[in-house]
């Protein structure tokens, strides 16, 4: 019999003892399933049951155009919910939706959404995360809309939240703007819309310590603070730019000027780098917008790589999975501010999540690069900032309707249950 020595010793503790070796670590312990919470659950996680069992998902449809994609899920008895595919490359995402995701949910009961979402991940083990999660987000968010419509409540109210106005921060996406011009436009927006928080950009995305213009970051930090005064909450996004020594130096300059968080200081996959920065700085470190593997989320949180967790509801695979990230954060005493960098429905989803979360941060991200009126071409009612806050749509579900004119010019695909 030819047994590798290592396996032989592991499976024969008596012989191992004869050889003077201790038994293999953990060999005597029987694992308890409850000790292994799966796919981002906390130990006390309660699965969602927001509607009665008995419905069947009969149809999944998608519409894509430009940067956006929407999904409609329809049950056999004709009930429907609308969701959003993750933005950017939505045509690729829609292909993944209909080829690899829809077949996992067609014919299923939507009531057990946790199991449904996990099945999509399990079934796509050879295609983990990015596009599968981007596609899953469309179905998951459509099902939450369905749950709200069946219960005649806005999504946040399904979870005990209220659709009241919620504070937002004005999120700049620009690096091609001088510190003086950036400060001037933020002052104008503060005066026009009552923003009490803003985020600006430093460095260059995955920039290996480079800056967008010589000295821009060092000038931007004090210039924006001086222009807006001390009463405004200021945030900075590094978009994966820095090595730890440079990130810590930039962070110290921000601390000198009272900035609240430093987002994604290091390449986000270098968790240990980000943890080093978080340990060195007194200001908060924020991050996680790109992360869609819930085990990686658990590691990020346990490593204290971030103080503020920022799941993107669509990158991470939908509301259900973002909720799990929020519960992991709550368990660790951390707060949540989702990534919602444009004014498509994802910002509506983020507002509902924040209204329902016990560990919501103080603000929701709200892009200042898009005109909310222009966004009415996508859905209604559009979001508007009044006195620094946005009213959360309070009709059942997400509280919005995708515009027919937009749908009519979009590319359409459909998957249907054959049973
Ligand atoms: Mg960011």
Image (spheres, rainbow, N blue to C red):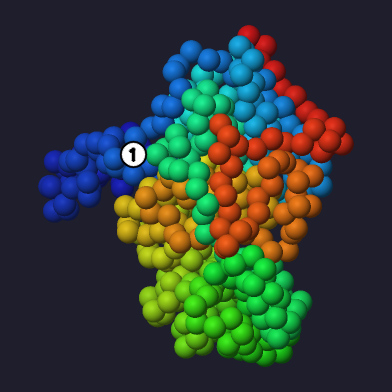
Q: Is residue 354 left or right of residue 101?
A: left
Is 87 or 183 nearer to us in this picture? 183
Depicted 341 relative to depicted 266: above or below: above
Mark yes or no: residue 67 visible: yes
Quarter of the image containing the C terminus? top right
Quarter residue 149 falls in: top right
Is 396 or 133 nearer to us in this picture? 396
The residue under the point 38% across, 32% down is 47
Is 329 or 40 nearer to us in this picture? 329
Percent coordinates x, y for residue 360 in the rendering: 43, 55
Percent coordinates x, y for residue 165 in the rendering: 53, 52
Quarter of the image containing the N terminus? top left
Percent coordinates x, y for residue 14 in the rendering: 14, 41
Mark yes or no: residue 91 visible: no
The residue under the point 48% across, 50% down is 354
Tell me the crowding category of disc 1: few under 14, some 14 to 19, or many 20 or more residues within 10 angstroms, Cα based. few
Depicted 328 relative to depicted 397: above or below: below
The residue under the point 63% across, 58% down is 385
Depicted 34 relative to depicted 244: above or below: above
Percent coordinates x, y for residue 43 in the rendering: 29, 42
Residue projecting furthest to the right: 409
The residue under the point 45% across, 37% down is 157
Task: Check disc 1 and report its element: helix, strand or loop.
Answer: loop
Count the marks: 1
**Mark 1 residue CB less than 8 A from any atom of ligand 1:** no
Q: Label 1 belongs to which residue?
A: 45
């Amino acid at each position: 019999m030819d047994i590798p020595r290592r396996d032989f010793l592991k499976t024969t503790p008596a012989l191992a003892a004869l050889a003077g070796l201790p038994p293999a670590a953990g060999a005597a312990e029987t694992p308890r399933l409850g000790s292994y919470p799966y796919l981002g659950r906390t130990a006390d996680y309660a699965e969602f049951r927001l509607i009665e069992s008995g419905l069947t998902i009969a149809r999944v449809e998608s519409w894509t155009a430009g940067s956006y994609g929407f999904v409609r899920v329809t049950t056999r008895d004709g009930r429907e919910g609308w969701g959003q595919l993750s933005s950017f490359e939505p045509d690729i995402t829609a292909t993944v939706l209909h080829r690899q995701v829809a077949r996992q949910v067609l014919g299923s009961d939507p009531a057990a959404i946790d199991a449904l979402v996990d099945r999509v991940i399990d079934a796509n083990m050879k295609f983990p995360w990015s596009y599968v999660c981007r596609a899953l987000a469309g179905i998951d968010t459509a099902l939450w809309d369905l749950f709200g419509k069946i219960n005649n409540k806005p999504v946040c109210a399904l979870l005990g939240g209220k659709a009241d106005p919620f504070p937002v921060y004005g999120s700049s996406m620009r690096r091609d703007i001088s510190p003086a011009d950036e400060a001037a436009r933020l002052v104008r927006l503060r005066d026009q819309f009552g923003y009490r928080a803003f985020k600006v950009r430093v460095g260059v995305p995955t920039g290996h310590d480079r800056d967008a213009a010589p000295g821009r970051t060092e000038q931007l930090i004090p210039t924006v603070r001086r222009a807006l005064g001390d009463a405004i909450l200021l945030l900075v996004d590094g978009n994966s730019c820095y090595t730890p020594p440079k990130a810590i130096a930039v962070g110290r300059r921000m601390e000198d000027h009272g900035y609240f968080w430093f987002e994604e200081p290091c390449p986000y996959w270098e968790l240990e780098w980000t943890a080093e920065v978080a340990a060195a700085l007194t200001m908060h470190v924020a991050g996680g917008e790109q992360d869609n593997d819930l085990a990686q989320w658990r590691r990020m949180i346990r490593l204290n790589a971030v103080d503020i967790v920022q799941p993107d509801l669509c990158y991470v695979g939908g509301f259900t999975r973002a909720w799990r990230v929020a519960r992991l954060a709550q368990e660790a005493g951390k707060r949540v501010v989702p990534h919602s960098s444009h004014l498509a429905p994802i910002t509506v989803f983020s507002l509902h999540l924040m209204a329902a979360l016990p560990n919501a941060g103080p603000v929701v991200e709200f892009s200042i690069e898009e005109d909310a009126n222009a966004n009415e071409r996508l859905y209604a009612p559009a979001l508007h900032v009044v006195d620094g806050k946005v009213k959360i749509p309070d009709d059942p579900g997400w509280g919005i309707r995708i515009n027919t004119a937009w749908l009519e010019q979009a590319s359409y695909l459909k998957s249907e249950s054959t049973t």
